[in-house]
Amino acid sequence: MSVSDPPSAAGRRVITPSRVVAGVCLAIPVVATLWVSSYARATPAFIGIPFFYWYQMAWVIVSAVFTAAAYVLVRREERARRRPVSTVGPTNAEGDGAGGADGLNGQGGGA
Amino acid sequence: MHTDVNHVNGVTLAVFLVFFLLVTVLGFLAARWRRAANAQHLDEWGLGGRSFGTWVTWFLLGGDLYTAYTFVAVPAAVYAAGASGFFAVPYTVLVYPLIFCFLPRLWSVSHRHGYVTPSDFVRGRYGSKGLSLAVAVTGILATMPYIALQLVGIQAVLDVMGIGGGAHANWLVRDLPLLIAFAVLAAYTYSSGLRAPALIAFVKDTLIYLVIAVAIIYIPIKLGGFGHVFAQAGHAYATVNPATHKPRGELISSAKNQFAYGTLALGSGLALFMYPHSVTATLSSRSRDVVRRNTAILPLYSLMLGLLAMLGFMAIAEGVGKGVKGYNSQLAIPQLFRDVFPSWFTGVAFAAIGIGALVPAAIMSIAAANLFTRNVYKDLLKPDATPEQETRISKLVSLVVKVGALVFVLSMDKTVAINLQLLGGIWILQTFPAIVAGLFTRWFHRWALLAGWLVGMVYGTWAAWTVASPTQAHFGGSSKLVPGIGRLGYIGVTAFALNVAVAVVLTLVLRALKAPEGKDETTRADYTADADTPRLHKPDLTLAAES
């Protein structure tokens, strides 16, 4: 079974403001670490550790913060999206319920 | 002189053995941990029942990705050449934002369809056993030397501890400790499956964090501060090697090496979650959110890795291997521990490395076994295999894989394992387009992906073969001049770019020719399904029907 996408799922907005912000949060650490010439120098040193090394170590922490921010943004949006499913009218429920419909079949097969 | 033949230190050995016994007991007890109703299902043995929460997954993934070999090899690379060895840090910085984008989708679709391996997904998505087999074989090939290198990690510790009797002892005495360690590992992996490394990972990581925290404070104080450590290291790197007429390394990445540094970090980051053992640990988690949450907390391990890399400089400042011709840099960190720590704490540190080898070796052998069972045995040899038969085969193959790795390490030169590990990284990266692009789009044609994979594999292998180093005529390094750019770059990334280019062009051609696209058994909603959406149950016959 399966194959084609449910028609209303395509109508769902894929690009939303919080997703864009999450994407930026994820892109920043990648760009920063790949831009090697921006940090390939010895000074300023930190407690005797050359810039090259402590700067990259600092990015471990900064990157974790950005990733956590992306996580919060995406999860908040996913929760907000799930909530209206049960209350909103049939058209919307149909789109979001596409997975649910398959799930029912799945349950039947598994029982 | 620090590198005299090491004599066995009783205290160190005793502490090491106590920890080893502890994890052995844990490994066997793990079979009872979170015990499932049907222990004979592959989901139970091979994926821990897909039940692990955030913290277990964190320990499991941490124990899996940051291996003993990493602990030995990353500081060893820094010790040997300086800045270039530090690429592991940017690599582990960028890997988590990357996987945040696609790993939850892989978790969801695998949850819905009961996929155990990345190749299962490829087969389901593209309806192509050829492509799925290519991904599976690449995974097995790349994992085998990785397991072998875990043994090299243990060997480094055993060597420095002085057990094994050195090079002049007969082979049985020399290799006996390693054989025992591996027999024990094989036994509890066989009986407990993925639960064993998951439980042992707690011990391993607690020890590792403890050792690093102590090392990073204690050693610099002992050596006169970081400023002194880096001054010594910078001096050592600048020293010109009389044989090659080149300096040993550099403290700061120079302009000609920066592109290689960046591409090595990028390529390694892209490749990491293509390794079957990473996917196994991911799929064993309970929910999509567990996967995402882990991308934000796993960097704690990266921080530790960065601190660990610093030990390479400290080994230089301490004078490890100084004046010894052809000193094996893999021994530098264990030797540093032995030189600066009291004997009992050296035992703790060595136990951390030794156990650090057992956890990933167990997960890797399980992952390779799952690949063989699902994508070779079931897909090609016995399509009607029951879950019980799958589990039995997987358990057996996990033994075969470990024995294979052992034979490999004992019979061949270590450099062969290291060369193959280098190749493995290049190879596994070539499965990225099929797996990750497939998580977002069905645009690529399955045959185009297969052709791209082949081109990437062939180019990558050839390019790595042509790289010479002062000590090796072939496989002397991971970087080569990139055609068209004229700078040194990581071979894996160049091969990957070729791979994608071929896949895109051939997809356009094949679509114009209307070549058969294969059946896609997934739906769009599958990629965002969470734990509350039940698994689809489909008759297994459909798996056998398509080619």
Image (cartoon, rainbow, N blue to C red):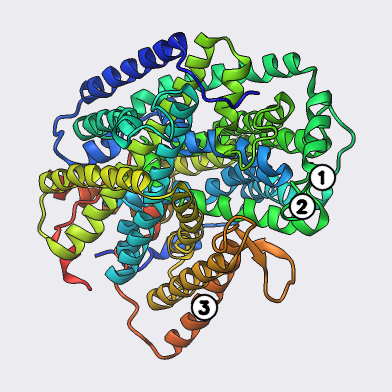
Between marks 1 and 3 in the image, the one whose residue lies nearer the viewer: 1
Q: Are marks 1 and 3 in contact (CB under 8 Å)?
A: no
- Label 2 sits on what residue type? Trp
Would you call the spot at circle 2 few (<14 residues within 10 Å), some (14-19), or many (20 or more)? some
Corner quadrant of residue B48: top left
Residue B383 image label: none
Write the residue at 64% across / 35% down.
A64
Residue found at the far bottom of this picture: B513
Write the residue at 38% across / 39% down.
B281
Residue identifier under label 3: B502
Residue identifier under label 1: A39
Direction from residue B438 to residue B464 in the image, left or right = right
Q: Are marks 1 and 2 in contact (CB under 8 Å)?
A: yes
Distance of mark 1 from mark 3, alpha carbons?
34 Å
Where is residue B262 shown, x and y percent of the image? 69, 54
- Label 3 sits on what residue type? Val
As helix, strand or loop, the secondary structure at mark 1 comes to loop
* Residue B47, placed above or below residue B448: above
Residue identifier under label 2: A35
